[in-house]
Amino acid sequence: MSATIRHLLPAALAFSLMLGGCASTNSSVSVDELIHHTWLLASATDADGKPDTALTGGDRAPIALSFHPDRMGISNACNGMGGDYQVEGDTLKVGNLMQTMMACEPVLMAREDAIKKRLQQPLEMEIDDNASQLILRNNAGVMIFHPSADTTDR
C-alpha cells in the first residue's frame, strides 16, 4: 500500500464515521414530550391526502389531545373522551376510550366518530425538534397538531 493511501485511509474512515453520525434518524417519542403540551388539531388529511373535513369542519375549537403519564383526554368533539395509551418507540396505541353520552349537532357527532376511528389504529408519531408540531399518521391519513399556547411546558 502506498504511503499516500496509508495516510488517507484513516482520514476517509473518520470522515465516513462523522457523516454517519449526522444522518437523520427517527428517535423514539417520549411520554415526556407528549405531556408537556395540550395538542390542538391544525390539519388532517385522509388516506388519499385530501382534507378530512369530518375532523376539522365546523366553526368550533379544534380537537385537543392532552396526555398525562398513563391517560389521555380528547376534547372539542361532541363528548369529552379519555382512556389509556401506550408509547412504543414511535408508535402511539390508544386503549379503550370512555366518553360522556350527550347528543350534539351533526358536525360535532361526525367529528367525534372521525377522531375515535383514527385513534383505534396504532399511529406513527413524530415531534419536531422544537416541539412545534405533533404528527400522527396511519392508514387512515395524517393529523398535524400544534401545542396550545397556554399549556406549553406545563
Image: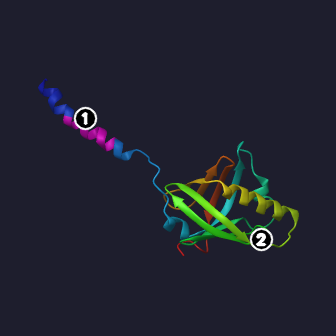
Image quadrant in which the N terminus is located: top left
Up-down relation of residue 91 to residue 150 (above or below) = above
Give 96 or 147, whichever is nearer the viewer: 96
Q: Residue furthest right?
A: 105
Instruction: Tell me residue 43's x, y (percent).
Output: 69, 55
Question: Secondary structure under badge 2?
Answer: loop
Residue corresponding to mark 1: 12
Please report the residue visible at 77 percent of the width from the left and 74 percent of the height from the top: 100
Instruction: Tell me residue 123's x, y (percent).
Output: 60, 54
Please report the residue visible at 66 percent of the width from the left and 46 percent of the height from the top: 139
Please report the residue visible at 80 percent of the width from the left and 58 percent of the height from the top: 57
**Tags 2 and 1 touching, CB below 8 Å:** no
Please report the residue visible at 87 percent of the width from the left and 63 percent of the height from the top: 106
Image quadrant in which the C terminus is located: bottom right
Give 149 or 66, whichever is nearer the viewer: 66
Residue 2 is covered by the magenta coloring: no
Instruction: Tell me residue 93's x, y (percent).
Output: 59, 59
Q: Residue furthest front?
A: 96
Up-down relation of residue 9 to residue 122 (above or below) = above
Instruction: Tell me residue 71's x, y (percent).
Output: 59, 71
Disc 1 crowd, CA 10 A, few/some/many (<14, 14-19, 20+): few
First reached walking from the N terminus: tag 2 or tag 1: 1
Magenta segment range?
Answer: 10-19
Number of labels in the image equals 2
On residue 79, the disc is 2
Q: Amino acid at mark 2?
A: Asn
